[in-house]
Structures are given as C-alpha cells and as structure tokens.
Amino acid sequence: MVAHLIRMKLAITVNGWKKSTGQLVLAILLMAYLAFVLVMLGVGASFMPELETDARGTILTLVGAVAVLGWIIVPVFFTGVDLTLDPANFATFGVPSRQLVLGLAMAGLATIPGAATLIGFLLSTLAWRDQAGPMLLAVPTTILGAVFCICISYAVTGLLAGITGQRRIREIMSIVAFIPLMLAGVIFAGIVESVEAALEQLPGLAAIIAWTPLGSFTGAPWALAEGRPLEAMAQAVLCLVWVAGALWLWQLAVNRSYAQVRGSGPASSKTKTGLGLLGVFPGTPAGAIAARSLIYWLKDPRYSASLVVLPLLLVLFWFLGYQSGEYVMILLMGPITGFMLGYSISADISYDGSAFAQHVTAGVSGRDDRVGRTGSLLAWGIPVTLLFTVATVWMAAQWWLLPGLIGVGIGALLTGAGVSALVSARFIYPVPPPGASPFATPEGGGMRMMLISLGAMVVVGALCLPGLILYVVALATGTMLLMWITLVVGLGLGVFLLWLGIRLGAKWFDRSQAETYQSVLAATG
Amino acid sequence: MSNPESSLSTPFPPEQSGAVPDPDTALAIRGLAKRFGEKIAVNGISLDVPAGSFYGLVGPNGAGKTTAMSMATGLLRPDHGQVWIHGTDVWSEPLTAKRRMGVLADGVRLFDRLTGEQLVTYSGLLRGLDRDTVAERTADLLRVMDLTGDAGKLVVDYSAGMTKKVALASAMIHAPKVLVLDEPFEAVDPVSAANIRDILAQFVESGGTVIVSSHVMDLVQRMCDHVAIIAQGNLLAAGTVDEVRDGQSLEDRFVDLVGGRSTGEGLSWLRT
C-alpha cells in the first residue's frame, strides 16, 4: 500500500514533466534552487559550532518553527497543491484510513518539498557536530519534525476542506486570509518598537516555542546542549506526542472526507429573483457581456483577488506617510490603480474557461465582445481611479497636482484596457479554474503565462510614458500649464489606444474564434 | 464483420468540390477531417441531414462524435472538408450559419455564477434578440424545462440534470432552425428526459431539425428517424433508422458494425 502510493506519486510527477517541457524546466529550476538553499543551510549549520550554545539553539528553534509554520499555512492558500492524493479519491477503494494516512505521509516525503524538508531538517543537526549527545538526539527529533510537517499540513488542509466545503465561505476565506499576510510587515513594524528590543526577546521566545509543536523538533537538542537532560527528554517525548496528534487529526480529516464522499448532495443556496445587473445594462450583446462581466467581478473571487492588493497598498502608503509626516508615496495610488485595473482584464477569456463556447456558438462579434468586456471594467474602474486620485491628493494636500495625476491615472486605465482588449482576444494562459482558490497556481502555467503578462505589462508601461514624462516635467518645474497638458495628453492618448485596442482585438477575435476557444479548452478544460 | 457499405445505399451524393448543397439540407458535411498530432480523430466524413429530421449520431466513446460536432458548430476548425447549415458555409459565413444553429456542447462549463434565469437571458441577448422577446421566451423555456422554481438559483449550485436543461434552454432561445446537441440526455432524470424529448419532437414536427449524439442505442432507436454510426473517425452507416438497423435492433446492428465484442471468456475468477 505504502509502496503503491509512493510509486503513484512519483509517476504522477514524472508524467506531468513528460506532458510539458515548461513544467519540467520549472521543476528543474525549483530543484536547483532548493538544492542551493539546502547546501547553504548545510554550510551554515556546520559553521554554527562557532556560536554560543544559546544563539545556536535560538536560531535552530526559530528556523524550525518557520518551516513548520510554512507547512501549515502555505497549503491553506494554495489549495489544490496535492489534489492527486486527496483522500477523497481513495474513498471508493475501501482502504483503511490508518493505512492510507501512513501511505500518504510517506508519499508526502517523496515529493520535492517533502524531501527538501527532510534533508533540511537533517542538515540542521550539523550545528551540533561538536557535541555527540545533542547531535545523536537531533537526528531522530528532526526526522520526526519532517514527518510532522507533512502530517499537520495534510491534517489542516483536510479539516479546513471540511469546514470550507461551502463554496461561498471558501471563496471569501481565501481572499480574507491573504490580507493579514500582506499586512504582516506593517503590523510587525507597528508592534515592535526597535530591532534591538526584538532581538533581545528572541532567546526567551525560542525557549517557549521549544515546548510547542513548532519548536520541539529542533529545541530538544538545544536543551541537552545547555545541560538540561530532563528538559531535553521531555521535549523529545513531546515530539512523539506532536506527531501522534498530527496523525490523529489527519485521520480524523480522512474519515470525514470519506463520509462526505458517501453522502455528498447538492448544497442548498439562496435564491434570488430578477435579472440583477443583466436588467440594468442595455439589452444588446455588448450590454449583456458587460453586465455578465460585472456580475463576475462581484461574484467570482478570481477577479476580486487581483485587486485585493490595492486597498493594502493604500494602507501601506498611508502608514509610510504617517511615519514620515510626508504623504508623497500615497500620490502614486491613482496611477497604480489605473494601471492595475486596466491590466486586470488581460486574461478575461482565460477566466471564462470553456464557458466561452457560448460566445463562439452564439456568433458574438469581436466588437461586441471587446466593447462589453472593457465597458464593464471602465464603468466602475473610472470612478474608482478618480476617487483614489482625489482622495490621495486631498491627503497630501497637493491640489495643483490633480489634473496631471488624473491624466496619468485615467490614461493608464484606458491604455491598459486597450492593450488588454487586444491581448485577451487571442492569448490564453492557464488560470485557476472557476471555484478554485484564486491564489492557486494553475497546472502547467509557468513560463508562458509569466512571459505574456510581463510583456503586456511592459507594453502598457511604455505606452503610458508620454503622459508620465510630461507629469514628471510639470512636477519638477512646477508649471501648472504642463499639468493641464498632461491631463489632455493622458486622456487623449488613452482614448485613442483604447479605440485601437478594441478595433484590432475585435478583428483578431473574429478571425480566430475557434482557435481561441480550443486554446481555452486546452488551458483550463 | 460484414461490409457496411454493401448493404446500404450511399446516403449522400459523391463529393463534388465547390458545389453548394441544396439549402433544404439542414446540415451538409463533405470530406470533414481532423487530426490531433498522430491521431486521426475524424477521417473524412460526408453526411447529409435532411431538414425536419430527428437525426441520431451514435458511436463508441472516442469515435469522433464530439470532434465532428465541434467542427460542424464552429468550435473547431477542420483540417479538411466543408460544413453547410441550410446552404450557408459554417466556416466562411460563420455569423449567418451560427444564427441558424442552437448548440449544446458536451462537457463545457457554463457561466455558472449567473442564475438560471440570467443565463438563459444572457444567451438570448448575446444572440441579439430584443429584451421583451428574451423575457417572454426565457419564462417559457424555464417553464417547460421545469426550472421556474430554481430560476433564481446560481447555476453552479444546480444538479447535473438541471445544468443540462438550462444549457438546452440557452441553446433554444433564439428559435434556431437546427439544434445540434451533444449528449443531451446524460445525467438527466427520466421525467425531465421525457419532457425534453417531447419538446424536441414538437420542434421537429414544426419543421426544425435536431441532431443528437448519444451512446444509448435504445433511446436513439425510439426517438430518431435517422441515424449515423461513427467509429474511429469513420462513418460506418447512415440513413433512416430502419435502413440502418436492417431488421435487427439498432444496438445489435451497431455492435455488428463497430465490432469489439469480447467472446464471453474473460474474468474466470469473477465467480461467487
């Protein structure tokens, strides 16, 4: 059973590489990177006997804690990391859950991140190479640590999957949970007054963490090295307890997912009446497409997730201004908002997935498709960009900049929308499928996606340059007239590029509808 | 296996390049072919579907049914061959041809963050119908599909059968002349299936043409008046159901033509 699962996991990985060279290249890069990190870790650990016992223990415990925490947190955001070995898939085979858990744990160690964690933990034992006792103790506890990482990670995702089975809750959570992570820096800076004070706290903190599941695995040898064998023994026993606990939680999750497979029924949902936005927009093909896009902006977390960074940036810039007393950075908000919103629809058809078939079989014209999609964005994108621009100018109390900033911001929005209208007509890249975590990395994404989106970004940036340069000159020379010229140039150029993008995009769309659809099918299924 | 061609009249005229078929032929296919890498999915199929017929397309899994239908409906560009809907070439005049067609593609997603009512309305508006017509037809379609009670639910929360029905409603709202339906009865409960069959039969009676793919032979024999059998990308037989089944049941005839029945030996250990 265990051997089967490991072999299957390896076969799946290798088949993935065979299927696409890009994935293979990415996997090789990942492995090279991990190998590099591991070598650095090994070298670092083998030099650590130079350090005081106290410092060594603190560093090892904290690094170990970060590794464990990583295994708990990361899979929550990247659901679908390892769906091939989802226990639910094995429900029909009637494998006893205890055996299955054991097999999955071993298979987990056979993955690239699993193996890297195991090797990393083992390399950390080199830090005690000058003392036989702690080194001998460190080997079993660190192995347990790696096993714990795998088990707790599966347990947490499994249990969360149970709670978050309802679509809406899962969708909201995947976005909300992302926010504190992005704001962590600000929060941390706010809490800790100075770096020195924080550093002084660390050994004490590490000593406490060593009694928790986060730190026991690397903390036990530390206690022994400090000459506290009883404490060390207690922490070593705790290691076993933590692993047993994680296994128990995991089995609970597996049992639950078995039960869910047996009794899965359609979830009930609220019903609402009427056409909603479809009744508000014009009753034309383009109007319908605009209404549908807007409904998706509201209901599909993949769209809103791309914008979650905007309010966060606002908070971050405000915080920086608050600290320094100069609200300068915050003035970037308007242009950044325009740029990001304009660019945000560059994967619109990719997000449709195979539902795009409806547009193809209905014979929607490229013009209607392009106008509808960009129209829905501009309908709220222009007010939002304006709002952000005016609000930040008000915060910075620099009213004379307003015309220039509007020219740059709205210009970037229109230019981005124009480039998106062209790019999204034909270039399809893998995106998370509807219903998946918006932060999930889609299978086989990789290079192509990065290249296209990077290319489109560079193009948008280049096309925005005239307005931007005018604005900088106006700012440097303090000429009000130049600010007004920036406004006119930014808007004029934006409108022209939008018109051009829609026109060319529509032509492209009409000529290659079937090919575009087949790419979508291949990319998202 | 007997040679299928010998027992059947050729159901279509010999291929003539450039000749536009009779506009009374609902769907005309000439020399349609598609290759995916090494695999030839559709190997030069020619077929005439007369207007007003209820045409069944049957074949084993992976026979090329979906590929052929995708090429006929403008979803997949053929390597060779031509397709006409009532005399309009699908690939040179796509907008006109698509206006005459209602399509239910198999296994594709819908815009499932819309409610059932929104989705059908969306489909109608995409087709350029005016708002009043769309509203009237949406209500009608939801009623006959027995979806009125769930009209306000998101399609993502629909069951498989309900999803099929709402997709079918979306394919019919513009009153097409030809309906091309890929596996329309899959996952649909018997009562809904019977209702859908009635709707399709009415549609045919009033002069419309329905082309369905299925691998339920029994259903095709009862429901359709014409049938074509496809296997491994080739057209094995085509004509009226009676012509094709040649006195046998359609299922037996199908197995005859397609082959691949094992002889009943096999799982000797499967005994209790």
Image (spheres, coloured by chain):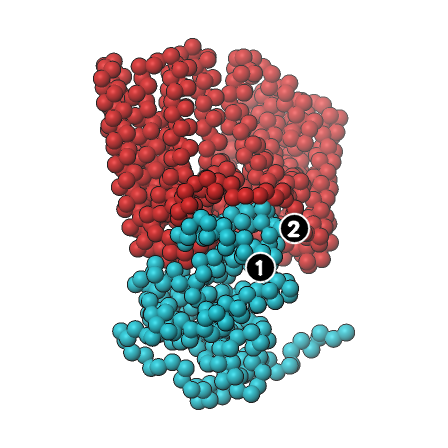
Chain colours: A red, B cyan
Identified at 35% across, 32% down, the residue is A413
Residue closest to the eye, B17 or A129: B17
Question: What is the x, y in percent for residue A429?
Answer: 41, 48
Please state which of the two labelled residues, at mark 1 or mark 2, is closer to the viewer: 1
Helix, strand, or loop for circle 2? loop
Circle 2: is it few (<14), some (14-19), or many (20+) Cα within 10 Å?
few
Which residue is outermost to the top? A325
Give the residue number, with chain letter if any, for mark 2.
Answer: A266
Taking the image as shown, residue A150 lies to the left or right of residue A375, namely right
Give the residue number, with chain letter if any, for mark 1.
Answer: B144
Please tell me the numbered disc located at residue A257.
none
- Residue type, label 1: Val
Residue closest to the eye, A524 or B145: B145
Residue closest to the eye, A289 or A123: A289
Establish if A194 lies above or below A471: above
Taking the image as shown, residue A231 lies to the left or right of residue A316, namely right
Q: Quadrant of residue A70?
A: top right
Asked if labels 1 and 2 share a chain, the reply is no
Identified at 69% across, 44% down, the residue is A253
Question: What is the x, y in percent for residue A204?
Answer: 64, 18
- Residue type, label 2: Pro
Identified at 67% across, 76% down, the residue is B267
Taking the image as shown, residue B77 lies to the left or right of residue A213, namely left
Question: What is the x, y in percent for residue B100?
Answer: 40, 63
Establish if A70 lies above or below A473: below
Residue closest to the eye, B171 or A304: B171
Helix, strand, or loop for circle 1? helix
Is residue A451 visible in the rendered structure shown here?
no
